[in-house]
Image (cartoon, rainbow, N blue to C red):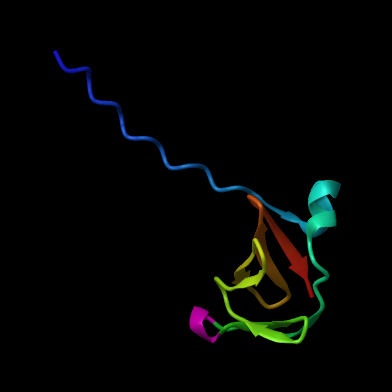
Amino acid sequence: EAPPAAAPAAPPAETPVVRLAELPPAVRQQLPALNFGGATDSPVAAARMVIINGQVFREGDEVAPGLVLERISLRAAQMRFRGQRFEVPY
């Protein structure tokens, strides 16, 4: 007799977004320096961009190895690094 089918796994809960200062010290030490030079906010995701360390990035771009720019807003960038989601004001 076949074992009962497993229930579908629930989607993982999204990791909460914290401020950069709230990240564990060990994680903060691994982050590269982030120097923001300006940003464009827009209701259209494809039109949003931010300048970090002299380069233009868009949502979804990898800013540095393992560091992904998730969301650009008027005054902050939401990023993900090694499973930690955080926001950096600019």
Query: Can you give x and y, in whole percent of width and height, for residue 46 in the image?
Result: 50, 83
Residue that appears at 52% across and 80% down:
43
Above or below, 31 relative to 49: above
**8 sits left or right of 81 in the view:** left
Mark count: 0
**49 sits left or right of 47 in the view:** right
**Residue 44 can be seen in this image:** no
* The N terminus lies in quadrant: top left
Specify the segment rendered in magenta: 43-47
**51 sits left or right of 49 in the view:** right
Residue that appears at 77% across and 57% down:
19
Query: Can you give x and y, in whole percent of width and height, for residue 75 in the image?
Result: 73, 75
- Picture quarter containing residue 66? bottom right
12 falls in the magenta region: no
Residue sitting farthest toward the front? 65
- Picture quarter containing residue 50? bottom right
Pick the front one: 57 or 88? 57
**Residue 70 can be seen in this image:** yes
Pick the front one: 42 or 66? 66
* The C terminus lies in quadrant: bottom right
**43 sits left or right of 88 in the view:** left
Residue that appears at 68% across and 78% down:
74
Above or below, 55 relative to 78: below
Residue that appears at 23% across and 25% down:
5
Residue sitting farthest toward the top? 1
Pick the front one: 4 or 22? 4
Above or below, 61 relative to 12: below
The secondary structure that dominates the magenta segment is: helix
- Picture quarter containing residue 54? bottom right
Residue sitting farthest toward the left? 1
Query: Can you give x and y, in whole percent of width and height, for residue 78 in the image?
Result: 66, 65
